[in-house]
């Protein structure tokens, strides 16, 4: 008999793999963009410190504030200082926010903090780790989602409800949270060093709400997300959307500084209708160390598209129990070593090579994992 994970992964594979293949065959230019991104990111890694400083200066030129956080604790402290006495926070899905334990931290301080990405909202309700870097609630079949929402949304839906009814029930819960939120926290799919812009990709519309309705927008992301130009950032968004099976994306959001207007005598005034504050937190947390290590550096090219999970036999069996959340699957075995110094996750890799074949930026994941295995043995 199939368990819940078997049902969920089977449905996810059926829905996602043919869709991505169709997107790529209909839009072959995306394969060229992916190759260009690899070269661009390699060039950034050669001068990563310079790009971090360039990005910080660019954010401040647009009226924002930028910070370099060495580790998770420093990132949480920066966020605490920005938020001050404010109490109501909405999150859009951010793997780096998860990496530093930000939501739990804010909730433990008594703040009303809610995830607004549907999958991440389900994860918040269950308290379980995410099962995938792009689709965090992938492990939950529809019936389980219905049961969960039935408990948390006062019976508005149940296990027999349709997908549409469940989405509508969550939408009406979250709409109230958006309208009252004082702070919106997002990640970044890419950060442009030339303009200081944060580029975000989505289909739900929640990121638009999180970045525009609250008076403060905080974007927290890794230094590996920096690309030289806004043009490069747009290329990366298109590739991420395609490899996630979400092409064309419903929305692309670019945030460059707080809201402003020049509609009265062309004098620029800030804020306008949107946020009055724009903050970008660039997290290191092991990334510089990995960049200095020739065996790990290639992992920093990862654009977190999540494609490698589905071609991996180990992930298909183990699901969320492989890796250090939010980083799982083949990419997570690499990132667990970078972020947590956890070299053991790589030992589960069977070297089938499927991940390498589908990775848009051509990371030789088995080779990186082989290196990590060697490190784990040589450091014992
Ligand atoms: S390792 Fe490659 S396929 Fe896997 S998430 Fe990163 S970019 Fe995507």
Image (spheres, rainbow, N blue to C red):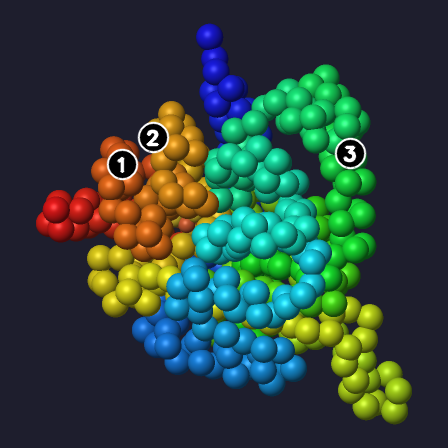
The answer to whether 171 appears left or right of 309 in the picture is: right
List the single residue furthest toward the top: 1
Q: Which residue is drawn at 24% across and 41% down?
A: 344
- At a point 61% along the width and 36% down the height, the residue shown is 125
Mark 3–mark 2 distance (CA, rounded to whole Å): 35 Å
Which residue shows up at 86% across the image and 83% down it? Answer: 263
Residue placed under numbered mark 2 in the picture? 314
Residue 172 picture location, percent across and down: 80, 40
Q: Callout 1: helix, strand or loop?
A: loop
Viewer-nearest residue: 131 or 252: 131
Query: Does the residue tagged 2 have its C-beta within 8 Å of any atom of ligand 1?
Result: no
Residue identifier under label 1: 349
Report the label total. Answer: 3
Residue pointed to by mark 3? 169
Q: Which residue lies at the image location 80% right of the left edge and 48% below the top edge?
A: 176
Q: Mark 3 and mark 1: span between their CA atoms?
A: 40 Å
Image marks 2 and 1: residues in contact by CB distance under 8 Å: yes
Q: Which of marks 3 and 1 is nearer the N terminus?
A: 3
Q: Do residues under tags 3 and 1 come within 8 Å of each other at their CB atoms?
A: no
Q: Is mark 3 within 8 Å of ligand 1?
A: no
């Amino acid at each position: 008999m199939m368990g819940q994970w078997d049902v969920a992964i089977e449905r996810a594979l059926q829905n996602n793999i043919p869709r991505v293949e169709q997107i790529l065959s209909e839009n072959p230019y995306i394969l060229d963009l992916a190759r260009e991104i690899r070269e661009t990111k390699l060039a950034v890694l050669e001068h990563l410190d310079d790009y971090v400083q360039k990005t910080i200066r660019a954010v401040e030129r647009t009226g924002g504030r930028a910070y370099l956080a060495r580790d998770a604790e420093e990132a949480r402290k920066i966020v605490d200082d920005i938020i001050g006495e404010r109490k109501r926070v909405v999150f859009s899905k951010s793997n780096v926010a998860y990496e530093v334990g930000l939501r739990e931290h804010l909730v433990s301080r008594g703040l009303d903090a809610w995830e607004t990405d549907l999958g991440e909202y389900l994860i918040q309700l269950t308290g379980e780790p995410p099962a995938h870097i792009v689709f965090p609630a992938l492990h939950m079949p529809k019936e389980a989602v219905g049961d969960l929402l039935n408990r948390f949304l006062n019976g508005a839906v149940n296990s027999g409800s349709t997908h549409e009814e469940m989405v509508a029930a969550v939408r009406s819960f979250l709409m109230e949270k958006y309208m009252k939120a004082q702070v919106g926290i997002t990640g970044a799919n890419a950060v442009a060093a030339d303009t200081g812009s944060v580029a975000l990709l989505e289909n739900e519309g929640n990121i638009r709400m999180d970045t525009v309705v609250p008076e403060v927008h905080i974007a927290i992301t890794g230094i590996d997300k920096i690309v030289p130009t806004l043009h490069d950032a747009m290329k990366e968004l298109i590739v991420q959307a395609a490899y996630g099976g979400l092409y064309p994306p419903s929305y692309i959001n670019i945030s460059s500084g707080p809201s402003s207007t020049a509609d009265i005598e062309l004098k620029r005034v800030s804020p306008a209708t949107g946020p009055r504050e724009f903050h970008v937190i660039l997290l290191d947390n092991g990334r510089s160390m990995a960049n200095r290590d020739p065996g790990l550096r290639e992992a920093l090219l990862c654009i977190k598209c999540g494609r490698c999970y589905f071609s991996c036999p180990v992930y298909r069996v183990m699901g969320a129990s492989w890796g250090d959340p939010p980083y799982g699957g083949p990419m997570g075995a690499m990132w667990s070593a970078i972020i947590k110094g956890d070299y053991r996750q790589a030992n589960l890799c069977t070297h089938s090579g499927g991940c390498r074949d589908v990775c848009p930026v051509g990371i030789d994941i088995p080779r990186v994992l082989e290196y990590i295995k060697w490190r784990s043995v040589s450091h014992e």
